Image (cartoon, helix red, strand yellow):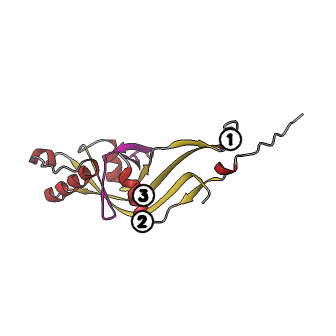
Amino acid sequence: MLIFVSIKINDNSKNMKTFPIFDQQRIEAIMKSCQYCTIGVVDENGIPYVIPMNFGYENNTIYLHSAQEGRSIRALEKNPNICITFCTNSKIVYQNIEVACSYSAQSESVICEGKVEFVEDFDEKVHALNATMKQYSDRTFSYSTPAVSNVKIWKVAIEKISAKEFGAKRR
């Protein structure tokens, strides 16, 4: 025999939903509030490959940096398409403490798509490193020639962007 239980949900916390975010300033604020982003590529064997990375952002461009070679570099040399995700720290919220399916993670996220262009010009590499360091510090930095020469700079002009707020109470 099946028994259906009806549970009254507290009115001041119901209707947690997912809402799209369209305001460009809010989207940029979400991105800038993150300590890292997660990038997704498809490796040379057709396998999805996702890694966390530090980043810089300015003028609809995301800058990333890495070693000169590796799995992600090999993947991007064959297929420069990239997906970059930013997500704010989430907080668990619920409508009813007794109902498992009423639990949700409350957070905001941004998903960007574009193509990676590897930067070779020394001055442009310095610019990208400065944009990245601006994400993490208000200090001004200088870089040695070997440091700049030995880093792989990824430049991604954002072609497509979407953002959402999760676990939000109905407005």
How many C-alpha atoms fall within 10 Å of the one at disc 2: few (<14), some, or many (≥20)?
few
Helix, strand or loop under label 1 = loop
The residue sitting at 52% across, 42% down in the picture is: 91
Q: Amino acid at mark 1?
A: Asn
Residue under numbered circle 1: 96
Q: Nearer the viewer, mark 2 or mark 1?
A: 1
Mark 3–mark 2 Cα distance, whole angstroms, equals 13 Å
Q: Nearer the viewer, mark 3 or mark 2?
A: 2
Residue 9: image tag: none
Q: Nearer the viewer, residue 109 or 75?
A: 109
Q: Amino acid at mark 3?
A: Cys
Q: Which residues are magenta?
A: 37-63
Of mark 1 and mark 3, the one earlier in the sequence is 1
Please say if the residues under marks 3 and 2 sit with CB atoms less than 8 Å apart. no
Residue 126 magenta-drawn?
no
Of mark 3 and mark 2, the one earlier in the sequence is 2
Mark 1–mark 3 Cα distance, whole angstroms, equals 34 Å
- Please indicate whether residue 121 sits to the left or right of residue 2 in the image: left
